[in-house]
Amino acid sequence: MAVLVVYLYPQDFKRLSKIEKSKEKSDMVRCLNKAVAIMAALAISFMPASATFAADNFAGISLTPVPSANPKAPGFAAANILSVELTGAIVAQGSFKLENPSDLTSYYGYDNDGPQLPAAGDLPAVGHKVEASKTEPDKNTYLVLDHQHGADPQYDYGTHFLFQGHELGAGGQGYITRINLDADGAHRVTLLAIKDVNGNSVPTIDGSTWYPFSHRLLFTSESGANASVVQATPDFPATVEDISGILGRGGYEGIQSDRFGRLIIVEDVGGKTGTVNTHARQPNSFIYRLLPTSPFDLKLGGKLQVLQVLSRAHAGPVVFGSDADADILSQDVKDLHTYGLQFQTNWMTIHDTAVQGNAPFSANAAAKLAGGTPFKRPENGQFRPGTNFSEFIFDTTGDTNALTEAGSAFGGFGALFRLQLFGDKGLLSLVYNGDVAHAGFDNCAFWDANRIVFVEDAGDTLHTQRNALDSAWLFDLNTDYSNPASQPVRILAEGRDASATLDSQFSGMPGFQNDGDNEITGWHLSDGDPTVNGLLGAKIPTPFRGGWRLFYTQQHGDNNTWEILRSPADSGGNSRD
């Protein structure tokens, strides 16, 4: 039996307006009706009715828990340990030479301001770098694309690509790279851009996503006052444009689109430490939504909104206060981190380009003025597959300090939240409250319809305090984690490569500019579909089947980017189809 499934591509919005009569459609969709009036007819495809069941059956493979995290031992490296059903292969590493080096950088993970390893006996000092600045490739975006080019006009670069921005760099300058997964070593990594169309340096980059409506990659930056959002074409050389006048400047990281082209943006900005609570920070980051005037061209503007959560302890919303200590241990923060409670939410408009123009602005400051609700460093989130983009799961990192006075009860170790979306309203609830062993949540990807992986970025301080490096955790959204016996499954105990082990020993020395312990970043599961139907959340993932591939980067140290495969012993010799 087959079921006819209608896939909605960008040209479908005019017909969609006849079908979708909900309040969600908004002014943006009415504008799209005019923009797509001359577009082609609906694209349709067939899908077996049993596809969802097959996906669930395969996705339900048992993953053996990794029993413990790797300890942090000074002077000792450690290997990555995956569930026995999984294995890993490096697709690029920091020392990979770029096919088109520049004055700024010649390697995937290193700038040109020093050697990749210190000379024997050399120590860092003010004004003296013992190592090149490590560029820290961050979030990955996988795409299957035709007709992509590189620095060699005679070379066939294939069709499978992994894109990433770089989080750090000499002089605070970032860049964009593309790993050509089908290419040989000489053509493996292409430098796509170090400048935007105005000749400005690409900012240091954290998050990334593919925006199929305009055929652009979107990159976010946390780089202080000049933090920005840029869009880039995927081909070489990339055309990079700063669109911060539309989305604002903030400590943005996670960014995801729904089927209408509306963006949810997750901000990661640490707050002030308390005067009394000296190991805890004030909630200071927000969740945003962009309603674009047209998803086909984000430069046309739109409305930026902030998530507002209504308090259960008092009338009105949960807002940013003037007293850091009061906010850190407020009843509102405690309630947000209490299992079983639900909170009504609103989206509050904080900037409208039709009214205020498109000059760059501080989204964080505007969110506070509008009564947005701050969280303790949310970093990433994704739409839950199978919910028609009506459910968004996001994390908070917390204080990354075992001594936090906030503890678990006030979100000191981070948390996972479920946001159910109903037009301009919603419901927020707690999925999981972190503790010292499950803390510092960062990147994420859905494993199937009900399970999602969140990885840790606990940092060197917490690594030392708990004597445990980072882990990747598999959470089941149908599990009641209020029961202490219910805990997520560790599927990766990240190790620490020799370079990161050395850098950890240098950390804190005057003149040393690089990070220490490895962290897990860029955890990304996708089938590479570049159409609207390929948006993360549009399909239920089937890991290692149907073209779905899983990547992550072991950031810092050697900066290895890995593909995770199904273990041959577990898959009858086929790591993926």
Image (cartoon, helix red, strand yellow):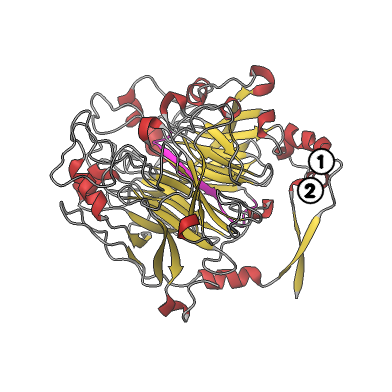
Q: Position of residue 430 (x, y in %)?
A: 45, 46
Q: Which region shows up in magenta?
A: 375-388
The amino acid marked with disc number 1 is Val
Q: Secondary structure at mark 2?
A: helix
Q: Which residue is mark 1?
A: 36
Q: Position of residue 186 (x, y in %)?
A: 47, 57
Q: Position of residue 384 (x, y in %)?
A: 56, 53
Q: Are marks 1 and 2 in contact (CB under 8 Å)?
A: yes
Q: Residue at x 27, y 26 (%)?
A: 274
Disc 1 and disc 2: Cα gap in Å?
8 Å
Q: Position of residue 323 (x, y in %)?
A: 34, 21
Say if 524 sits above or below 371 in the image. below
Q: Quadrant of the N terminus?
A: bottom right
Q: Is residue 385 magenta?
A: yes
Q: Residue at x 43, y 72 (%)?
A: 62
Q: How many labels, in total?
A: 2
Q: Secondary structure at mark 1?
A: loop
The image's mark for residue 12 is 2
Which mark is first along the chain, 2 or 1? 2
The amino acid marked with disc number 2 is Asp
Say if 77 sits above or below 576 in the image. above
